[in-house]
Amino acid sequence: MNTATTTATGAALGLSAEQSAKRDIQTISLIGLAHGTSHFFHMLLPPLFPVFMREFGLSYSELGLLVTIFFVISGVGQALSGFLVDKTGARPVLFVALGCFVLASLAAGTAQGFSGLALAAALAGLGNSPFHPVDFTILNKRVSQQRLGHAFSVHGITGNLGWALAPVLLISVHEATGHWRYAYAATALWALIVIALLAFKRDAIDDRQGSWGHEKAGAAKAPVDEHPMAFLKLPSVWLCFSFFFFTTAALSAIQSFSSPALSAMYGLSLASTAFVVTGYMLAGAAGMIVGGFLVAKSQNLERNIAGAMAAAAALLALTATGWLPASLALVAAATAGFGTGLAGPSRDMLIKRAAPPGATGRVYGTVYSGLDVGFATAAPIFGAMMDRHWNNGVFWGASIALLMGIAAASVVRKA
């Protein structure tokens, strides 16, 4: 890829190669912070599920329903917000979303039972809904083609780091203070800090200052004037949706129930299994670093996805057997995150190729709503398994879901 092509976005604005690189890095970093914050708020409630069971007498099925509330609202909102982002721009929507996270923290911290927690889940889901249309619109418009694969990698890494940080912060504040409500004061403060930083650096996330890849090639390749819903006719859009559905069904099992499942299967304390999710997400972040370079050097995205996710499925299946010593089971479950992380940048580039020019917000909104549907559907199913003491079913189910995701990705290429 030559320099003229790779720095086209910067050149279109009259920037030197050095200025373009600095501009890209700033945008990638800020969007990474925003995305990490959205993933942090995915985990606003699950790390303290044992506390809610004790405090409010809730069952695993009811806890799973809280996850469903979050992701149903997020999924519907994500599909709709793609249209809003395409019409009004991404930056204003981003600030409204972050404000919802502050409100969600306040609702969680003042909850007196299931209804209060449900309100927190709903507000957090509403805040989460526009992030993928917002993030990918800003990245695709502002970041040079040379660094776009790495931008997707950083985007995925920060998401995993947000997932990893949430249990650490919430559990640490709860244990340090002896009051779980103080943990939600900390999450509200975090959201406010992010809002302040993005407001200070708002020019770096202005999607009005950029150009789409197709615009660089001239008017001959400009987007066709067609119905806003025309992209829904593309088979690749729905195959990518199904890919997200299956892979996030697996992730739902790990995030919400891997800790109590491992505790019951291997006779470990919840304190020793609580950070398996953190290990899974950190391993996923490491996989995404490698995956970003893999995307830059490989055109066979489906093969990258299949190999990485097959390895993750194998590790989860091995954990499910109960054959491993307890310490190795924890390592195997956490290490599976590397495989799913490795597939992440290839996944995002696959969706970019499926998106028609000018419809990126709509396509990402629709495709990524598969993530929300997967979480919303899987959480009560795996919660019911836990209530029936089918603890290893959490890992068998996650493994099978990853294999189904591989099948969906392989069909995308044919479509």
Image: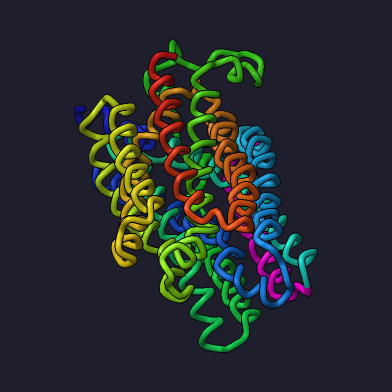
Residue 43 to residue 31: above or below? below
Q: Is residue 297 left or right of residue 167?
A: left
Q: Which residues are magenta?
A: 87-112
Residue shown at the point (38%, 18%) measured from the top left: 413
Q: Nearer the viewer, residue 91 or 209?
A: 91
Task: Tell whether position 297 is magenta.
Answer: no
Which percent across, then down, holds residue 265? Answer: 45, 62
What residue occupies the far top of the structure in this picture? 220
Color encoding of the figure: rainbow
Residue shown at the point (75%, 72%) measured from the top left: 111
Residue shown at the point (56%, 89%) measured from the top left: 177
In terms of image quadrants, where is residue 372?
top right
Q: Is residue 354 left or right of residue 380?
A: left
Which percent across, then down, holds residue 252? Answer: 53, 50
Q: Nearer the viewer, residue 304 or 5?
A: 304
Task: Tell whether position 96 is magenta.
Answer: yes
Count of numbered labels shown in the rendering: 0
Q: Nearer the viewer, residue 410 or 400?
A: 400
Predominant SS along the magenta part: helix
